[in-house]
Image: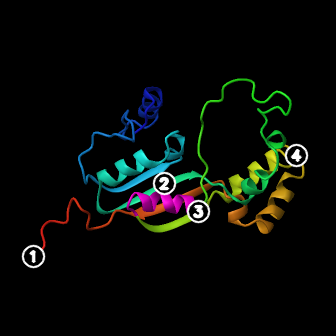
Amino acid sequence: MDISRATISRLQQLLPDHQFMVGDIRATNFPDDSFDAYFSWGTFEHFEEGLGKPLQEAMRILKPGGLLFITTPFQNGRHLWRDKGPLWKWDEYYSKNHGYPGKMRFYQYRLTRPEMEREMALHKFEILEVSGIGKIQGIVRMMNHDFGVKRTNKMFKIIMSLFRLVFSCNSVCHMIMGVGRKPAITPSNRGCVG
C-alpha cells in the first residue's frame, strides 16, 4: 500500500504477480483484526503529526497476537553528537547570515531507541525488540556527509573496513527497527468474565 498512484502503478508493472494498492496507512479500509503481521519500512516518520495515527491503524487491523515491524531513521550517536553543534555547520540549507532560503517543508522524524519504545507502548504494543539496523549504510553516510569521503575515493574501502570495526551500531546505524505484538487480549476482544 502506498499513497502514490504513480508508485503503485510502477510496482504493478515491475511485479505483476503481486498485489499492490493505493491507500493511506493512517486510515485503511481493512476490517478490524485482518492481519497476522504488519511491515512498514521507513514510512511512519513522514507524518508531521507524528507516528500516532499509523500506529493506531496498525493496532486496529492486526489480529490479536499479530506482529508489527516498523523502521524509522535512527537518531544515532553520530546525529546526537552533530546536533550539539550550531545548525549552520551541518545543515547545508541553512545560512548563518540569512537563515533558510524559504519555507521548509516537513520531511521526517528521526527516533532514538527510547522514543521508538515509547511510541509503540503508547499505542499498546507489547515491545519485543528495538534495535539499530543498516550499519553499513550509516557508515557510508557518515563518510560522505561528515568526512567528505565518497565511494570514488581510493581510500574508501580501507576507511570503510576500519570504521566497521571502530563504530558501534548505536553510533552509526541508519535505521531503527521496532518489533511489537498486539496483545492477545484487548478491550475489544476480552468479552465478559464471570
Q: Which residues are magenta?
A: 113-125
Q: Is residue 54 left or right of residue 172?
A: left
**Label 3 is placed on what type of residue?**
Arg
Residue highlighted by disc 2: 70
Looking at this view, is 35 or 103 the one in front? 103
- Name which of mark 2 and mark 4 comes first in the sequence: 2
- Name which of mark 2 and mark 3 comes first in the sequence: 2
Q: Which mark is residue 140?
A: none
Between label 3 and label 1, give the one nearer the viewer: 1
Quadrant that contains the N terminus: top left
**Label 4 is placed on what type of residue?**
Asn
- Say which quarter of the image contains residue 131: bottom right
- Name which of mark 4 and mark 1 comes first in the sequence: 4
Q: Which mark is residue 194?
A: 1
Q: What is the secondary structure assignment of the residue under circle 1?
A: loop
Residue highlighted by disc 3: 113
Q: Picture coordinates of residue 139 (x, y %)?
A: 75, 55
Q: Kindly indicate whether the residue at mark 1 contacts the one at mark 2 (C-beta within 8 angstroms).
A: no
Q: Picture coordinates of residue 6 (x, y %)?
A: 46, 26
Q: Name the residue at 72% across, 60% down.
A: 77
- Disc 1 crowd, CA 10 A, few/some/many (<14, 14-19, 20+): few
